[in-house]
Image (tube, rainbow, N blue to C red):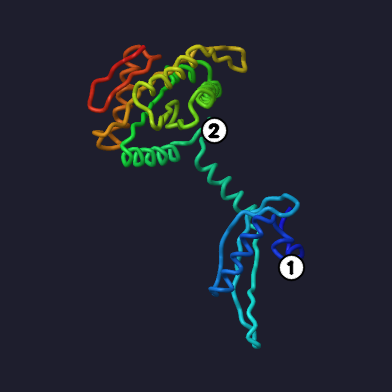
Amino acid sequence: MSITREGIIGKSVYELWKKDEADVFSAQDEALFQQGGLQVYETNVTSLDGAHHIVQFHKQVFTDSSGAAGFLGAIFDITEKKDLEYALAQQAAVDELTDLSNRRDGMAKLEILHKDSKKKNRPYCIAMIDIDHFKLINDQYGHNNGDIALKAFSDLTKKLLRSSDICFRYGGDEFVILLPETGLDDGFTVVERLRQAFDCNQLTFPDGRSVHSTVSIGLTQYTADSISLEQLLRASDKALYDAKNTGRNKTACIQHNQKTKNII
């Protein structure tokens, strides 16, 4: 239900909105009378029929020729505009195939996590993940079935990762998982659970063919002596490289400035 001109003219805020919201708007109107000037703000409102709206208020005090004070107000229902803005923002931030954050959005979240962890001197982990022999899946089973493999892994991350963890598609068959407030041992437990679950998951394609697919994981932890985010990314990438070059289907852990420890 939209807010119409005919539906609001001549009515008080208590005839339009829920009482708790109307109390706030009434207090803001009183403050406007006391201070004068112009009020412009956006807020959420709930009409008496229970419909939710996002509106923009424009209010201004005036004095007529007799000296009587009042104010002029206009209300713009911007619910559809805000919904569209949100949908476009989501579209720009989400990978269309996997419904995970895309690289741009994921890296922005990583930068925020890194700055916050550095400020609070708290640990976090980065895991870089590749689907093993993904090119062979594409070549032998077709790119559509390769997409199914990517989707199967992304769906598994949504089921098995903690609510605080963030997984995004880094590019191609590579994913990144961010583990806030997590040390290397706990991070290993989280990503190993994911690796083992995917190892046990036989992929069956629409044409009836099936394939056993696995992933390799490179895990590193932010520590107080970590100089930059770029170094952490290089460290996790090195650990992934070591995991893939020592047999695949394993998690390789690396502490910044230390040698990789491979764990099968």
Of residue 52 and residue 176, the one placed in the foreground of this image is: 52
Q: Secondary structure at mark 2?
A: loop
Look at the image and tell me whether residue 202 can be seen: yes
Picture quadrant of residue 239: top left
Q: Amino acid at mark 1?
A: Ile
Label 1 SS:
loop
Dot 1 alpha-carbon crowd within 10 angstroms: few under 14, some 14 to 19, many 20 or more: few
Which percent across, then down, holds residue 230?
Answer: 30, 36
Disc number placed over residue 219 in the picture, else none: none
- Labels 2, 1: front one: 1
What is the quadrant of the C terminus in the image? Answer: top left
Query: At which x and y percent is residue 69?
Result: 63, 79
At x 43%, y 21%, the residue is: 190
Label 2 Cα crowd, 10 Å radius (few <14 / some 14-19 / many 20+):
some
Q: Which residue is mark 2?
A: 99
Question: Vertical placement of 230 versus 236: above or below?
Answer: below
Residue at the image position 56 percent from the left and 68 percent from the top:
39
Residue behind mark 1: 9
The image shows residue 194 at horizontal and vertical percentages of: 46, 19
Q: Amino acid at mark 2?
A: Asp
Residue depicted at x 57% and y 50%: 85
Furthest-bottom residue in this view:
66
